[in-house]
């Protein structure tokens, strides 16, 4: 996948992703301040706009950099800042490569999750986006067959979302709820799952051709 | 939604415009989007700059504390959401007088991560920064996790003291140490009686029954310790004050500063009822109030409710509170 | 009734107590019932004294404007009702420095008759008084009956100017003339979005539908010119400002002071939206704003709404506004 | 009627009068600020308390003076100040008299109304308490027979209340309502009527003996 193909795939995904904005906003209302829906819809639009400005010969790293910048500024928030930082960290492992392969995607996923863990001082089990991200990165690393990889990641992320529901939030706004956070579903982890699902829905062969 | 506004999406830009039109001698805007305000004489050469920032809807917090003897600049987010790291960097560059810049703001994830991004960028510009987080809300975390508490009205004390220290020429490390010292000795707790309606969504920030109050509420309507039946002013003052006294570990012989802060819709008369009882309780314990503030210092749009903040004083801390300061919203002479 | 209070009947005495506990260096109480507050250094020998007063529930009005360069004393009534003539007399005696006393308060029957009773009693004590009434609310009477208008937030300008004149040593007649001059050149109009609940009765001061506002409302919730659909901030500013400009007869080349006042529950952000549009309108007309005030200056407990006041300026009037003043609620340096 | 008898009669009347407090408060809510009910109930209690402190040998003027002072301070307001001033003005015509007769009552009533007119810069037709007071004073002057005098005053006051309903308020808070005041009944005039009715109800032979 070269830079241009990556850019198209991201745009496809982000056209679908905002359909989950209301769900994510409601989850964040229960556990935080309810703005995650806005972050997701404004962020997706800003990224699409930024990618449309990029020259088609841009490298994958440049594509991800543009995404990070646009998402960070669209609706600055915890999620915006953490995701932007994660994208930067992930793209750094790609260097100047003209094209990316599965192995590089695996490294990206792990670097992205580790960036959030470091910046957010958070681990798996803290009931954050990481509860979906690390398992998904792990699943990617363990799945070789191209066609199954995304499904494996989605399945792992989903398990993470469900498992973390019964945990107490240890980071961010939700942590102030203390034991009242138990039983509520983490909006950030859910957002990550929905992002993967949007990717799948929008980039299956029949739709991937859309430019 | 009963508000005196125009298009909800223009709310922040328009009231910032109003502030700039009203106070041109004190403040100026930086950058195209005017989401960064700095004191009119910024940068002050050789002085440590102090940058704050956060979501809108809390006036006079944060924009109100930019001025002589206070902060030097502010990065302004949308209602209840963080400014971007680019805006924070802009503020940083505009106030840097060569002595470095202190980031002093409330402990909220969105703000923390955006200020942190700005630190890296400022470093590339050769500007040294230090960070101190307001984290005075005792209701948000137990004492063992005090580092994770959210920041509310008590940050006012840190602005005042760190601002005075910077103004007299302290170094970046000294100003940061003073801010940290103030924050460590400040505790705040509030009650909410009615919610805020966000201009963009038109939705209330929380729901409360007619006879209920939320004890330990945050300034974005975050839930507190528990929801209970509305109490009298004296009972509320007692609950809040006792909790603060315990948290700070103060007792007879100590001196404090007290801030009774209105969250938006609560009349000043009611704030004086809270002050009265707080004063009586502390006096009965032998704790002297050397300095007091009663009014709106950190609000949540039109939320009804109030918070009480206590800062344990030393001679040094008191001198910094007493130092002169001037902003559109606060004056000490 | 969601209020942070104790026994409703103790509301006024308790918040006055709170004010006294908070500001002992600036204010002192006179008399057993502590319904009279005077500046801590009263009486100031040889200086004209200024006494104001009226019902409670309007903080910072009236108690908030007692201090150096402002009023010397205040007689405090129950919520929305007059102080007694005995209390007014007490204030008069406490502030009289031998140069006579100006009564400066809002034009409300209860206050007028009680201040008038006090005049006779003060005369018996050998104290000369003069009276000037705040009557700036253009919505309460047409221009031909301007003498019968009620007094609202615009009285602040008269306190400031008359207080400065008294402080510099003007005679009673001169101070009264200055107060009268300011009142004659001040016009105010307000809008109400939600009512006040009186602590004693628990009843709302008026009823409004969810999408309605009352244009020209008084600070006790008195009805205004008409009830209409809630408008945008810009539309409200336009309606109020145009009416004030017409009433004052000002035009290009004139200079004014503007006060955007919150009635209690309206956020400062919204007041800045009103200021912004007012500034734009006046600027477009060639009228310069030489001085502005944005905040809560005269409230009606937790009423939501705002008022705009305009004072036509001369060099003399501006100098009096610029003169130093200090009270617990207002400072000019 | 000597001072003691006058004091008892006033106390009897003021025990009944506050029954009208709610009605008066509601009328004042519609046309003013709704505090007239409080003025009337706090005022009546304060006057009774003050009269209980007076020595039984007090002169009629001294009795009225005590009433004026108590009523003025109980709940200071337009009505409290105007009525207190009216009582002072009325009592002045009695001088040092040990006892009062019909003629003296007539003079009192007129002086009281004139005091309010002067202080309030108001006349009959301005839709104030005077629309009931002046007609009542007139009726007293024209009625010689002792038994009928109070009835005549009540009837005149009642006519005044009803007639003034259709007028526009020209004084006080109600005047700010401008033409919206037309059709609403003046609370002050009504209060005066209710006072006379309370006097009648409480001082008829069967009840006048109460001490
Ligand atoms: N320290 C952290 N580390 C990792 N993820 C975090 C952290 N804090 C919050 N999150 C994630 O961010 C989500 C909330 O994002 P967002 O709504 O943008 O936060 P906020 O509105 O509080 O700024 C949470 O559901 C959680 O998944
Ligand atoms: N200038 C005046 N002259 C005579 N009576 C007046 C005047 N102003 C008001 N009143 C009477 O006072 C009544 C209202 O009394 P009150 O409720 O005490 O007034 P407020 O609450 O405005 O002080 C009115 O109904 C009217 O009868
Ligand atoms: Mg959120
Ligand atoms: Mg947020
Ligand atoms: Mg009244
Ligand atoms: Mg009334």
Image (spheres, coloured by chain):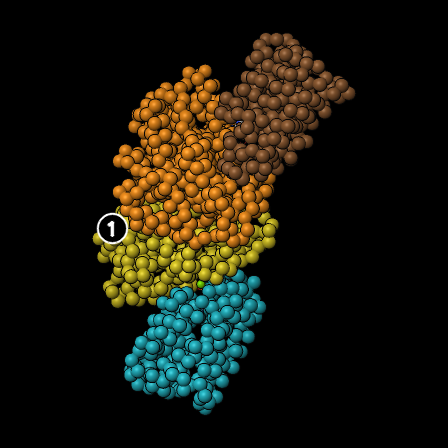
Chain colours: A brown, B orange, C yellow, D cyan
> Where in the figure is residue A34, as x and y percent of width and height?
58, 36
Name the spot of residue C159 as percent of width and height, x first.
36, 50
Instruction: Report the residue at 68% width, 12% height from top.
Output: A1
Question: Element at badge 1?
Answer: loop
Is residue D108 visible in the rendered image? The answer is yes
Residue B199 versus residue B307: which sits nearer the camera?
B307
Image quadrant for the C terminus of chain C?
Answer: top left
Q: Quadrant of ligand 2?
A: bottom left
> Where is residue C92 drawn, in percent x and y?
29, 59
- Could one spot residue B263 in this view of the protein? no
In-front residue for pair C238/A105? A105
Q: Which chain is indicated by disc 1?
A: C
Question: Looking at the picture, does residue B285 appear above or below residue D123?
Answer: above
Which residue is at 46% across, 77% downward? D16
Residue that appears at 59% across and 33% down:
A165
Left or right of residue B91: residue C159: left
Q: Which residue is mark 1?
A: C41
How many numbered circles are shown? 1
- Determine the residue located farthest toward the right in the rendered image: A206
Q: Give residue D28's position: percent from left, percent from top.
A: 50, 66
């Amino acid at each position: 996948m070269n830079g241009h193909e990556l850019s198209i795939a991201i745009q496809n995904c982000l056209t679908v992703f905002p359909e989950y904005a209301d769900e994510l906003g409601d989850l964040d209302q229960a556990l935080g301040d309810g703005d995650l829906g806005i972050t997701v819809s404004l962020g997706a639009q800003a990224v699409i706009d930024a990618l449309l400005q990029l020259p088609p010969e841009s490298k994958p790293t440049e594509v991800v950099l543009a995404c990070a910048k646009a998402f960070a500024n669209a609706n600055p928030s915890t999620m915006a800042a953490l995701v932007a930082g994660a994208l930067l960290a992930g793209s750094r492992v790609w260097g100047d490569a003209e094209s990316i392969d599965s192995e590089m995607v695996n490294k990206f996923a792990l670097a992205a999750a580790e960036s959030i863990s470091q910046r957010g001082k958070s681990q798996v089990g803290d009931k954050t986006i990481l509860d979906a991200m690390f398992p998904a990165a792990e699943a990617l690393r363990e799945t070789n067959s191209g066609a199954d990889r995304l499904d494996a990641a989605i399945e792992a992320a989903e398990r993470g979302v469900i498992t973390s529901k019964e945990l107490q939030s240890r980071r961010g706004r939700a942590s102030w709820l203390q034991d009242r956070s138990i039983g509520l579903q983490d909006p950030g982890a859910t957002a990550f799952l929905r992002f993967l699902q949007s990717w799948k829905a929008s980039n299956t062969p029949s739709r991937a051709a859309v430019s | 939604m009963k508000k005196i506004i125009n298009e909800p999406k223009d709310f922040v830009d328009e009231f910032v415009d109003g502030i700039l039109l009203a106070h041109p001698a004190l403040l100026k805007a930086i950058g195209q989007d005017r989401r960064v305000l700095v004191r009119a004489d910024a940068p002050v050469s050789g002085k440590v700059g102090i940058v704050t920032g956060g979501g809108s809807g809390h006036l006079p917090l944060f924009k109100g504390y930019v001025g002589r003897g206070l902060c030097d600049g502010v990065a302004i987010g949308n209602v209840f959401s963080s400014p971007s790291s680019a805006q924070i960097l802009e503020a940083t560059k505009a106030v840097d007088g060569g002595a470095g810049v202190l980031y002093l703001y409330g402990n909220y994830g969105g703000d923390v991560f955006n200020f942190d991004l700005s630190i890296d960028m400022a470093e590339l510009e050769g500007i040294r920064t230090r960070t101190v987080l307001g984290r005075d809300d005792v209701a948000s975390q137990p004492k063992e996790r005090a580092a994770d508490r959210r920041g509310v009205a008590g940050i006012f004390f840190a602005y005042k003291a760190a601002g005075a220290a910077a103004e007299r020429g302290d170094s970046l490390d000294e100003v940061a140490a003073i801010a940290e010292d103030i924050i460590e000795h400040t505790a705040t707790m509030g009650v909410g009686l009615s919610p805020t309606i966000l201009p963009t969504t038109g939705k209330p920030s929380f729901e409360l029954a007619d006879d209920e109050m939320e004890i330990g509420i945050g300034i974005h309507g975050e839930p507190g310790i528990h929801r209970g039946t509305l109490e009298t002013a004296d009972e509320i003052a007692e609950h809040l004050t006792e909790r603060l006294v315990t948290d700070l570990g103060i007792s007879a012989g100590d001196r404090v500063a007290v801030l009774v802060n209105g969250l938006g819709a609560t009349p000043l008369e009611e704030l004086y009822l809270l002050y009265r009882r707080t004063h009586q309780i502390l006096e009965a314990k032998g704790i002297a109030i050397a300095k007091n503030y009663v009014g709106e210092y950190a609000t949540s749009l039109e939320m009804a409710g109030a918070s009480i903040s206590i800062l344990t004083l030393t001679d040094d801390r008191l001198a910094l509170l007493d130092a002169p300061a001037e902003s559109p919203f606060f004056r000490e002479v």
